[in-house]
Amino acid sequence: MHIKSLAAQSDCSSAQHIKAVMDALEQVKFDQLRLELQLEGLGLSVHNCFPRRHPVTGRPWYVFEDEPHKIKNAKQGIQRQVIKSRPELHSLVATIKAHRMQFPGSLRTPQHCPDLLPKLELLAVAKSQPELNTLATIIDGATDRQNVACAELAFTSRGFIYAVNTEGFPEIALTLLVLGHGYMSADLRGPSMMTRCKWFHEMSLFCAKVSSNEAASHNCMLF
């Protein structure tokens, strides 16, 4: 009924109206799929959540908490951070470039960061190398925040992770590597079951450690 009443409205040509209709159709399709799977004996109640209600129907808006969705949430956690001082960013980029020119391939003195995935340091490393410009665009939030491919690139780029580690941020590089492996354990074609289990186990141990010992001191949301 909600969809019929939306379609009957006079201003149905507006972008906002069309989006409301498409959102309602999307929810109906999702609910149908969820109920069909439930009839087949596959209950998804432990794998989905409803962080908000649908603005049109008022019903809970369910979403699956699968690995691609989690890695996208991690990327958005970085993008949502606000860099208060752009001059500080430019200064850090200059420092990284100067170090790379003086000591190519060497590991800079490790820098302690209070956050697991700080936007300032990640963006500075990405901006310091031309071949990482695409990642700089992603981290700065200039791309589609719902794009899983962008999130995948940010967490699985070997060149980026290597650069982050070399420039003195080994803890951040480890976080990227472990979360990237956790994502690939569920979504990447090719790895053996043993490799998948190893990657997923490492991510589970890492998240357990962060949750139990360090979560209170970090403001960067992982999942």
Image (cartoon, helix red, strand yellow):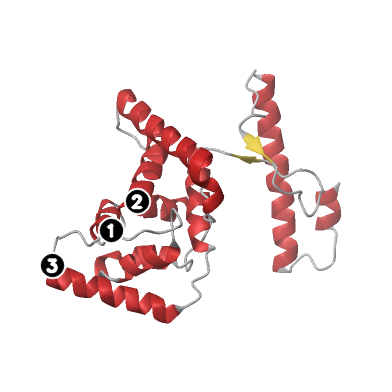
Please tell me how crowded label 3 is: few (under 14), some (14-19), or many (20+) other residues with Cα within 10 Å.
Answer: few
The reply to whether callout 2 and callout 1 are in contact (CB within 8 Å) is yes
Residue 171 shows which numbered tag?
2
Residue 103 shows which numbered tag?
3
The mark nearer the N terminus, 2 or 1, is 1
Q: Which residue is mark 1?
A: 110
Please tell me how crowded label 2 is: few (under 14), some (14-19), or many (20+) other residues with Cα within 10 Å.
Answer: some
The mark nearer the N terminus, 2 or 3, is 3
Task: State the residue at coordinates (56%, 49%).
Answer: 216
Please tell me how crowded label 1 is: few (under 14), some (14-19), or many (20+) other residues with Cα within 10 Å.
Answer: few
Q: Position of residue 150 (x, y in %)?
A: 42, 56
SS category of the residue bearing label 1: loop
Q: Position of residue 28 (x, y in %)?
A: 73, 41
Identify whether 41 is placed above or below 219.
above
**Distance Cα–Cα, label 3 vs label 1:** 15 Å
Task: State the residue at coordinates (78%, 54%).
Answer: 55
